[in-house]
Image: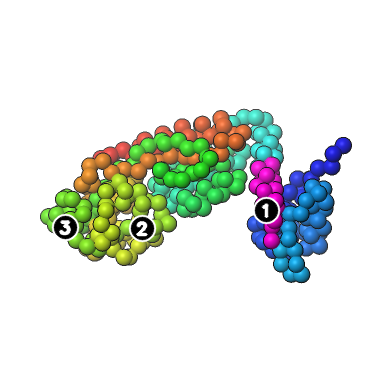
């Protein structure tokens, strides 16, 4: 019988790749460093291949080692799904489901998603993670998430994506500024008058594109880290901003002197959708979760709510 690597060896390999340090990887696996080193050496012997280049104190993964890590990650993911499938007796929407979401959607949607999941799928353990699009999609590709709720378009590679709703962008300004010409062509607005989020938040890129902002001088050099900060800057009459309909429907402007109105372009919006790995065996659960999220978004993104 052909000698094959064990699941434990592959898990050790992935831990070493993640931590890039034998001591930290061993701690993460709750084993001694010598045990980890021996396991990796045995794995190389089993595969008859060099996975690491070593010198006295450091190491790097060989190109083949990087390829093996990618394959190992897929194998471990399939093993985890197999175990989950067996524990749930093959029933969808049972057991753990790891949902990632970007910060400009999470506060307005995830609470209701969690509530509906508890009502309809009591055997589901919904695990939520809020992070940027890049980090969430990376975690999804590595099998650390099952699905990501994000704004589209966005580069998702080989992942499967579905658009579930359109979220309109609205101009938000102080009520005292209604006669300052912000209903005119955006590129005629005063320089540095538009406040936006940090560029790691895809909301900024989507807003700039959707609202046809071509002159970068109109954007203030200050970039906020949250919609709450944007609200405070505009409420203090320092400029204007663009906010998605779901945020306004959720009451982010309550208690302020701010008003919202349609963007001057009249058709400025971002698509809200989900992404998952097409190779996963949880297809039925993904379909049911997608339908549930779409139901929530239908209400959250409704204009003039």
Rendered position, 259 above or below 158: below
Task: Specify the label residue 197 is tagged with.
Answer: 2
Comparing labels 2 and 1, the label whose residue is closer to the camera:
1
Left or right of 251: which side holds 21? right
Q: Which residue occupies the extreme right position in the image?
A: 1
Can residue 249 be seen from the camera position used here?
no
Among the two numbered marks 1 and 3 on one chain, the one whose residue lies closer to the N terminus: 1
What's the CA distance linking mark 2 and mark 1?
38 Å
> Residue 74: horizontal and vertical position, in percent?
65, 43
> Residue 70: horizontal and vertical position, in percent?
65, 47
Left or right of 64: which side holds 301? left
* Colour treatment of the image: rainbow
* Residue occupying image coordinates x 36% and y 58%: 197
Q: Secondary structure at mark 2?
A: strand
Q: Main secondary structure of the magenta part?
A: helix
> Residue 248: horizontal and vertical position, in percent?
30, 48
Q: Quadrant of the C terminus?
A: top left
Residue 70 painted magenta = yes
Q: Which residue is mark 3?
A: 177
Q: Please give the range of residues in magenta.
A: 60-76
Q: Secondary structure at mark 1?
A: helix
* Residue occupying image coordinates x 56% and y 49%: 139
Task: Specify the label residue 63 is tagged with.
Answer: 1
């Amino acid at each position: 019988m052909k000698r094959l690597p064990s699941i434990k060896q592959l898990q050790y390999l992935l831990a070493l790749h993640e931590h890039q340090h034998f001591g930290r990887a061993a701690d993460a696996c709750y084993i001694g460093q010598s045990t980890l080193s021996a396991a990796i050496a045995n794995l190389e012997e089993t595969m008859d291949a060099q996975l690491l280049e070593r010198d006295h104190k450091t190491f790097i993964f060989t190109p083949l080692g990087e390829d093996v890590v990618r394959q190992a990650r897929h194998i471990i993911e399939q093993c985890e799904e197999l175990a989950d499938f067996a524990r749930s007796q093959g029933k969808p929407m049972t057991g753990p489901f790891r949902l990632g979401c970007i910060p400009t959607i999470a506060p307005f949607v995830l609470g209701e998603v969690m509530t509906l999941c508890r009502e309809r799928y009591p055997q589901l353990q919904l695990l939520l993670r809020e992070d940027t699009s890049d980090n969430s999609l990376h975690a999804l590709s590595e099998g650390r998430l099952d699905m990501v709720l994000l704004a589209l378009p966005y580069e998702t590679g080989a992942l499967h994506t579905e658009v579930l709703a359109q979220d309109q962008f609205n101009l938000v300004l102080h009520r005292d500024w209604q006669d300052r010409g912000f209903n005119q062509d955006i590129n005629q607005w005063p320089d540095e008058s538009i406040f936006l989020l940090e560029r790691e938040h895809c909301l900024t890129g989507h807003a700039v594109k959707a609202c046809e902002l071509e002159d970068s001088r109109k954007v203030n050099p200050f970039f906020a880290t949250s919609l709450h900060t944007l609200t405070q800057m505009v409420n203090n009459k320092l400029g204007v901003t663009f906010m998605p309909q779901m945020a306004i429907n959720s009451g982010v402007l309550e208690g302020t002197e701010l008003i919202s109105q349609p963007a001057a372009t009249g058709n400025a919006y971002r698509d809200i959708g989900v992404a998952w790995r097409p190779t996963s065996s949880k297809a039925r659960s993904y379909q049911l979760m997608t339908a549930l999220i779409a139901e929530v978004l239908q209400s959250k993104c409704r204009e003039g709510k």
